[in-house]
Image (tube, grey):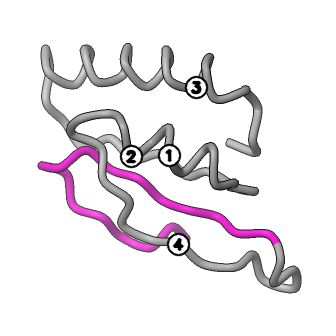
Amino acid sequence: MYNPFEAKLLREILEKLKLSYSLEPRDLKIIYLNTSVEIEKTFSKVELIQKCLHEPEPGNPRCFWAAYTFKKARCVRPA
């Protein structure tokens, strides 16, 4: 995702993903480009989600991307 939602809507979407994951556990990863402090806080408030990578975008050191996963899923660097 490239910062498509405000934090409130993102929280609602993450809660729905959490419910889906709890009903059917599976590898589930979220790649988020152009993170902000508010977005980071939103992800951190959702139980089961953990940040596994956080790096600057190549060629743009002021723009960060992050990878999140549900706690039982393995985190691997995206291709």
Q: With 15 as the anchor, is 39 left or right in this view?
A: right
Span colored in magenta: 63-79
* Residue 66 part of the magenta segment: yes
Q: Which mark is residue 44?
A: 2
The amino acid type found where label 1 is placed reads Lys
For label 4, the residue is 54
For label 3, the residue is 10
Q: With 79 as the anchor, is 73 left or right in this view?
A: left
Badge 3 or badge 4: first in the primary sequence: 3
* Residue 48 part of the magenta segment: no
Kindly state the secondary structure of the residue where label 2 is placed: helix
Dot 1, crowdedness within 10 Å: few (<14), some or many (≥20)?
few
Whether tag 3 and tag 4 are in contact, CB under 8 A, the answer is no
Q: Quadrant of the C terminus?
A: bottom right
Whether tag 4 and tag 1 are in contact, CB under 8 A, the answer is no
Measured as percent of width and height from the top left, residue 4 is found at 76, 32
For the residue pair 40 and 63, the one nearer the viewer reads as 40
| Distance CA(mark 2)–CA(mark 4) | 13 Å
For the residue pair 74 and 53, the one nearer the viewer reads as 53
| Distance CA(mark 3)–CA(mark 1) | 11 Å
Kindly state the secondary structure of the residue where label 1 is placed: helix
Whether tag 1 and tag 2 are in contact, CB under 8 A, the answer is yes
The amino acid type found where label 3 is placed reads Leu
| Vertical placement of residue 43 versus 67, above or below | above
Q: Nearer the viewer, mark 4 or mark 1?
A: 1
